[in-house]
Image (spheres, rainbow, N blue to C red):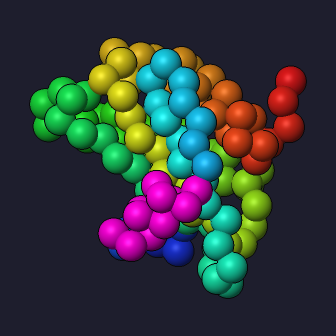
Amino acid sequence: MLTAEHRLRHRDDFTVAFRAGRRAGTRRLVLHWAATDRAHPTRVGFVVSKAVGGSVLRHRTQRRLRHLAAARLTSLPLEGGLLVVRALPGAAEATSAELGADVDRGLQRLGLVPGG
């Protein structure tokens, strides 16, 4: 689970990640990354819109993504990063393994983790 200090909660931080950051897309996800000059731990936020499905599907998808992001948090830069994971409609039907592969692929495309 993501601790409170690693959760992205404020609208302004999401805006920074979307507008000033880099973006990498996969079949089911789009990852937005912005390195900031502020001294805070790397934080992760999620956007799961109604296009993904009803309330139950959206919350299930977000919980699965939160779990996957927490497991990969140690491989991200330790300070100053904002990562937003945006789910596309295909994320609702994907398995956790498929979502994990998409998260890994997106992080590699952003240059945050080594490829391979």
Q: Residue 40 lies in what quarter of the image?
A: bottom right
In which quadrant is the C terminus drawn? top right
Q: Which residues are magenta?
A: 11-21
- Identify the residue shown where x is 71% and y is 34%: 109
- Identify the residue shown where x is 36% and y is 28%: 88
In the picture shown, does residue 48 fall above or below 102? below
Residue 90 at what x, y percent from top left?
36, 18
Can you name the residue that lies furthest to the bottom here?
Answer: 39
Looking at the image, can residue 52 be seen? yes
Determine if the magenta segment contains residue 36. Answer: no
Determine if the magenta segment contains residue 18. Answer: yes
Can you name the residue that lies furthest to the left here?
Answer: 54
Looking at the image, can residue 69 be seen? no
- Identify the residue shown where x is 34% and y is 47%: 47
In the picture shown, does residue 94 fall above or below 14? above
**Main SS type for the magenta part?**
helix
Q: Residue 6 lies in what quarter of the image?
A: bottom right
Q: Is residue 57 left or right of residue 93?
A: left
Number of disc labels = 0
Q: Is residue 78 left or right of residue 90?
A: right
Residue 50 at what x, y percent from top left?
17, 35
In the picture shown, does residue 8 fall above or below 113? below
Q: Is residue 115 left or right of residue 28?
A: right
Can you name the residue that lies furthest to the front here?
Answer: 19
Residue 10 at what x, y percent from top left?
36, 72
- Identify the residue shown where x is 66% and y is 53%: 73
